[in-house]
Image: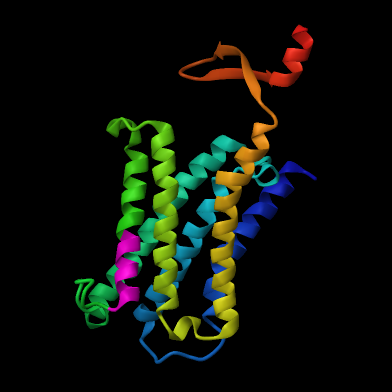
Amino acid sequence: MNVVLQSVLWLCAYVVVVTAPLFALLFGPVPPPGGFWWDFSMALGFAALAMFAVQFALTARFRRASAPFGVDILHYFHRYLAIGALAIALLHYLLIRIGSPAVLGTANPLDAPPHLSAGRAALILFAVLVAVSLLRRRLRLEYEHWRALHALGATLAAALAYWHVIGTGYYVDTGWKQALWSAYGMGWIAVIAHVRRVKPWRMRGKPYRVAEVRRERGDAYTLAIVDFLASLKADR
């Protein structure tokens, strides 16, 4: 298949995954009217969570999905989408804070409804994850340590955000809507399991060694790698 066509199809798939929760809001029982800004803020919240959900898949580096773009492009895509999703989530909160502050109630987690506290915690955690990722080198964090903490924090933030969504009531009060969000949740778990367990297990059977390091223009380097087991047989 043509590379351009593959890229277009994957971008369309991304749009479908992100907008599916928005279209789901149009069907089922109608919640009490809250006005344009209220409905708009709800749509932003669902869109932000869907965008954060797709972030897990972007970092999994599935060959079929990454081939048309390249790993570097997906890396930047992941970074800027995270910033965009965080901005949308913040706007979701600010619109409610300005237009319907009574709905948010107290910020004290001991007195506030659990799903609202979960939403606040998720927003703060997502903001910290994005900030630390952008400042990792300045903070002098080792990549492997940062990567492990980033994965753990992202998983916790996604779980809190999912709890927040389930607690909204009217917007996920039908079986098929709950099934939709359950599918997103299972997708997160499947991707995490693939990246942290399945993929490393498969790679253990295919070790490689660095055969050459070539310096390119600027600060770029090319690593030439070879199959470790095949190279051992060749040396013999």
The residue at the far top in this view is 236
Which residue is pictured at 61% across the width and 64% down the height? Answer: 16
Q: Position of residue 90 (x, y in %)?
A: 32, 62
Which residue is pictured at 69% across the width and 32% down the height? Answer: 205
The residue at the far right in this view is 1
Q: Is residue 223 magenta?
A: no
Quadrant location of the C terminus?
A: top right
Decide which of 9, 210 is in the foreground and name it.
210
**Quarter occupied by residue 142:** top left
Residue 74 drawn above or below residue 53: above
User: Is 62 placed left or right of 178 in the picture?
Assistant: right
User: Is 151 placed left or right of 197 in the picture?
Assistant: left
Which residue is pictured at 73% across the width and 20% down the height? Answer: 229
Q: Which residues are magenta?
A: 113-123
Quadrant location of the N terminus?
A: top right
Decide which of 156, 99 is in the foreground and name it.
156
| Circle count | 0
Residue 213 drawn above or below residue 110: above
Q: Position of residue 112 (x, y in %)?
A: 24, 77
Which residue is pictured at 73% across the width and 14% down the height? Answer: 231
Decide which of 148, 20 is in the foreground and name it.
148
Q: Position of residue 53 (x, y in %)?
A: 51, 59
The answer to whether residue 157 is visible is yes
Q: Position of residue 173 (x, y in %)?
A: 50, 85
User: Is 62 placed left or right of 72 in the picture?
Assistant: right
Residue 82 drawn above or below residue 183: above
User: Is 64 placed left or right of 166 in the picture?
Assistant: right
**Quarter occupied by residue 143:** top left
Residue 45 drawn above or below residue 35: above
The answer to whether residue 20 is visible is no
Decide which of 233, 125 is in the foreground and name it.
233
Q: Main secondary structure of the magenta part?
A: helix
